[in-house]
Structure formats: structure tokens, C-alpha cells
Image (spheres, rainbow, N blue to C red):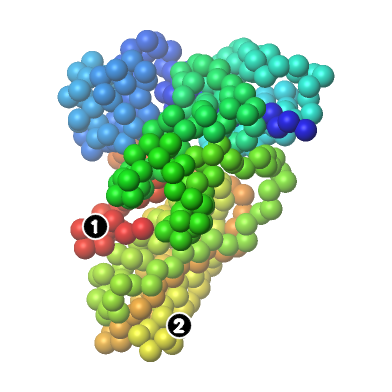
Amino acid sequence: MRKRIACIDLDAFFVEAALQVHPEFRGKPLAVGGTGSRGVVCSASYEARKFGVKAGMALWIARQKCPELTCLPTPDNIMSLSNAVHERLKEFCPLVEPASIDEFYLDFTGCDRIYPTNLAIAEHIVREIGRSPGLPTTIGFGTNKLISKIASSLGKPAGILEILPGEEKAFVSHLPLDEIPGIGRKTVPLLNSMGVYEVKDILRIPLDAWQAAMGKSGEYIFNCAHGIGDVRVIAAENKPLRKSISHCVTLPENTGSRSLLLNYLSHLVEKTVHKLRREQLICGCVSVRLRFSNFASDGHSVKISRTNDDRDIYQAAVALFNRTFKPGIKIRLVGVHLSDLRPGVFTHDLFDSLLPEYRRALPDVLQIIRAKYGFSSILRSRSTIRGRRYD
């Protein structure tokens, strides 16, 4: 049976959420995110993007590019609007998978009698989501999630783009490399060094060569260039609940430097919390493990109040690190493990209201920038390794 998969992308979602609170700014250059002198743009309206304002840009640079720019804080209605869209989409489709706060996959396979054409489906969804909860939408249709996602990206803003069955490879092969999900600013130079500058160049290299050079990542790149992608759309309620999230790193050289080890620890905490927040989970237990130069290992765990705030988790991790670290003994591996996971979203502490606005909004801004540009696109200064970002 022919697969009919749609990717629903809410256009400039954070800006549109802010405009529901401040409709007087519609049609004007607008940035959402931090509003202080050290703020960062989380999302920009299309009017602001014409001036070069974009997500991740320092606010002072954005104001230089667009002197008439209006800056608003990240609105509190983000989650409620995302949930409202999710509920509306379930009215139209039997299978809806939230991919992020502003992106959803829908599987209409087998719905031919109800929806004879994909265009009819798309026009209906655009109209209804535009009516309630009142958000503009772009829809991409394809035979797998990869094709529908790329189509939704190219269809912005407020567009409908369908890639017909059998046209997947031809469609993808004419695209630049960075249109492929997962190929970002760090992967492009690597591919360029292999003589790959466009997606069509990937097709010249056989699969076994890609696997030998890049393992599973190489296989993914090869499949993408042929228009092959995942066809599984899994409803949120059917996804198995993750039991734990962990990351570890074997150091390039054994070290006893406490400050350097804490840099690695911070990076690992940020990485695990990024995944925690992306999957809308909170954790109740933090563990830190060290492996020494003699290959012996030691570690400790602690129960914490449920959270997905990297500040709280990092403080707990540092306390565990101090219990495990032995001065004079070099370390070869650092690991962070988060467990006792439950569904939930970040909730600000009562005393967060006393913090400057840009610090309160920081966790959300980090998550949004990373969702678009990758985890390593922005890191806390304590997570940098000798002046360079570590992956």
C-alpha cells in the first residue's frame, strides 16, 4: 500500500505565539527571545528575516541589522498552543507523531476513501489550524518522513508541497547538502573534503565506501541521497517510555586536571539534558562515573527533585564528581547517567522570577537553537574544551 506521510511545520511558531498575545506587532519586524542587552534571538518574523535577522543571533547584532526591530520575550503560551495543534491534528488523522514543539508527522496511508488526494488533506488542515488555534502552517507530503520533512522545509512559508511517488530520488538529488536533515555546518566541510558538494555527488560513491568511511552515518547519507527514509509514524502514546539517558566520553589523553574534567562533565550534562528536554522528560536521579587510568571505575548516584534544568543537574553532577575524583590519579573516561525518568516539561522555580529575563528564558532559547542548528551550535562557556567545542 502506498505510503502517504505528511510533515506539518508551524511557520515562525514562536513569533506567531507571541503575536497572539501582542497582535499589534503583526506585519512588523519582530524577534522573540531574550530582550536584555545580552539576549539571543529565538525566532524572527519573516519581516525581520528580510534584514538578515535569524535564530541564534545576538540581539545587539539583530538591532544593528534592523533598527526598527521589536523584541518580545518568549511567550508562556508555547506549550499550550503546541498541545492544541496536536489535539486538532488527531481529529484529522488516525496517526500523529510530535517530532518537536512545532513539527508533526501524520500517516494517512489507507485513508484514500476519506481523503482521495493529498492536496485535499493539506488544504483542509491549513484552513482548520489557521482557524483554531490560529496558526499558519506549511505541509510537505511524501512517501516517507525524510521526503515530507524536506518538502515542508522548502514549502515555507504557508505552502503545500507534495513529492509524488517515484520522484523521491530525483527530488533530493538536486538539493544542496544542508537541506538534508542531520547534515549541518560540521558535516558539510567533511563531505566537501571527500569531493561531495551537492546531494547528487553522494550518488557517485557506493554504499560500502560510505559505510567504511562514516559507519551508520554514511549509510544514512547514502539512503537520503536516494530518497530513502523512515516510514514509521508512531503516536506519542505508543512510544515506549525511555528508562534512562546517558553519555560518556573517553578522553584524548588521561588527565588529572579537575578544571578540564569539569568542562567535560558540563558538556555531557548539557548533552543529556538536551535529549531529556527534546523528549519532554524529567529525571529524578543523576549518576556520574569515572574510569581511571588503571581501568578501574567508580561512581555515585543521587536522587534529586524531578527536573530537566541543566543548572540543577550540573550542580548534582559536580557534587558526585567531587565524591569520586581522587587528586593525583588520572582519569580516562567521564560519564553522566540520568534515570528515574517521567514525562514532563521544565517548570521554573519560584525564585527564578528574581532572575533577569534573559536567564529565565535561556533553557528554552538553547533548545530552540539546537533543534534547528544542532546540539553543538551553542554551548555554555564551561562546556568548551580548551577553547574548542567537543562532540
Dot 2, how many residues are within 10 Å of its Cα: few (below 14), some (14-19), or many (20+)? some
Viewer-side residue, 235 vs 39: 235
Relative to residue 54, is residue 21 depicted above or below?
above
96 lies above or below 192: above
Residue closest to the eye, 279 or 96: 96
In front: 158, or 270?
158
Q: Point out which mark residue 388 bears.
A: 1
SS at mark 2 in the image: strand
Tell whether 192 sits left or right of 37.
right
Instruction: Judge the density around disc 1: few (<14), some (14-19), many (≥20) Cα neighbours within 10 Å.
Output: few
Vertical placement of residue 309 versus 157, above or below: below
Question: As drawn, is 122 to the left or to the right of 301?
Answer: right
Q: Is residue 84 visible to the viewer in this orientation of the structure?
A: no
To which quarter of the image does residue 160 belong? top right
Residue at figure coordinates x 65%, y 27% from the top left: 165
Judging from the image, what secondary structure is the residue with disc 1 in?
loop
Q: Position of residue 13 (x, y in %)?
A: 47, 26
Name the residue nearer the viewer: 302 or 380: 380
Residue at the image point whose x is 47% and y is 27% from the top? 153
- Left or right: where 273 falls relative to 144: left
The three-letter amino acid code for the residue at tag 1 is Arg
x%, y% of residue 113? 82, 19
How far apart marks 2 and 1 lie (CA) works out to: 28 Å
At which x and y percent is residue 357?
33, 37
- Quarter of the image with the N terminus in it: top right
- Can you say which quadrant of the picture contains the C terminus? bottom left
Coordinates of residue 138 in the picture (x, y in percent) = 53, 21
**Taking the image as drawn, is residue 247 in sight?**
yes
Q: At 66% from the left edge and 40% from the top edge, which residue is drawn?
A: 231
Q: Which mark is residue 298?
A: 2
Report the amino acid beneath label 2: Asp
> Considering only vertical position in the picture, is 293 above or below 322?
below
